[in-house]
Image (cartoon, helix red, strand yellow):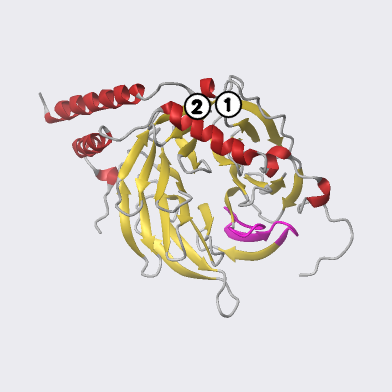
Amino acid sequence: MPIVDVENLTDLDKAKMELEQKKKEVPLERALLSKGCTEFMEAVQATADEDPLVKGIPEATNPFKEIKGGCVIC
Amino acid sequence: MGEMEQLRKEAESLKDQIIVARKGFADTTLQEAVAGTAVVSRVQLKTRKTLRGHLAKIYAMHWGAGLTQCVSASQDGKLIVWDTLSTNKVNAIPLKSSWVMTCAYAPSGNLVACGGLDNMCSIYNLKGKDGNVKVMRELASHTGYLSCCRFVSDSEIITSSGDCTCILWDIETGTEKTIFAGHLGDCMSLGVAPDFKSFISGACDYTAKHWDIRDGNCTHTLSGHESDVNAIGFFPNGNGILTGSDDATCKLYDLRSDQELITYQDATIMCGVTSLAPSLSGRLLLAGYDDFNVNIWDALKAERVGVLAGHDNRVSCIGVSSDGMACCTGSWDSFLKIWN
């Protein structure tokens, strides 16, 4: 597959490439922001309660707590 | 009118059309939508482990899909695979080139990859028959530094480069499957979608691009940042893109409405963002900055709810483990810290 050497493209070629890309992006199917926002909020709030960094991890069950004494079996 | 002028005018006109189109779908803002939601309470994470062993600046780290191992890359010329619970080094892999800028852990746990100023992506097999970790492939086609790499599977990896392109590689044959060209500045980082069908890239042309892995097309170009986009990542639900930039802000973009949802900024923060990672649910955004700190943002309310201060130099990389139990930061001070 030919490598596209972007650094050595002429300004004209870069402008053509940008134009082609913009043509593809204009007709993009977009959704209402309100729909996007609601979905974000719902997705986050549904799982935030179980998010360890949000709700905190009790010292007793924290796997990363400091190991004092005892032995590690590898 | 010269051809260049003609092309510029056409592009400007299309850009305006896109702006108008986006405005048409902007019937609210995230700030309005979350007005009734309370900010999360202050998040205070403690350093639980410090991973010591690198002898120079750490440039990258990546958690494995298993819950406790991660890989880090330092310009001391080593890739280290850590067991974060015991802080033991599982593997210490010497690199041919010490100018490493990125590393990645395959979801399977079998492979790790790295690359940097050698313009190559080197793949290492951690599960070789005789127990030695050896270079399995060297993927060399980029004409610029390797800024980031991420595995799609054990047989495919995506790389981003200072040559402004990203490449999807076939690891088996060591050849390029697809070249993603379109950025007009160095590509600085990339993120693969949770469903592995698409990926996103951030670049020094101040934009983030969303690409379809199979057909090679750029489906969205998201702008708004006023400087290089250094860090990028998918929001956990896969429809949002988080970016971090030298303009001292992070942004959240929505793919379906093709526009920015919110900006994470504060007048007191004036240094660039180097790295970012969302928490498991996406409620928190953890971002590493040039001022040696990590700021923790409430992703919905765009308010700072915590700071991780403990490194003595720039925080260059950050990651949240796959079960969300811990965050790992890597720094130019040569240490990695595990926080929760």
Residue reaching furthest to the left: B1
Looking at the image, which is closer to me, B303 or B88?
B303
Does residue B226 show up? Answer: no
Q: Which residue is mark 1?
A: B302
Q: Position of residue B99 (x, y in %)?
A: 51, 53
Name the amino acid type tagged 1.
Ala
Q: Is residue B275 visible?
A: yes
How many numbered circles are shown?
Answer: 2
Residue A17 on image: x %, y %: 23, 39
Along the line of sight, the residue nearer the viewer: B71 or A9:
B71
Is residue B68 or residue B23 the one in the foreground?
Answer: B23
Residues at discs 1 and 2 in contact (Cβ within 8 Å): yes
Q: Chain of mark 1?
A: B
The residue located at (64%, 27%) in the rendering is: B304
Inspect the magenta stretch and tell me whether residue B74 lies in it: yes
Q: Is residue B162 above or below residue B28?
A: below
Residue under the point 62% across and 25% down: B37
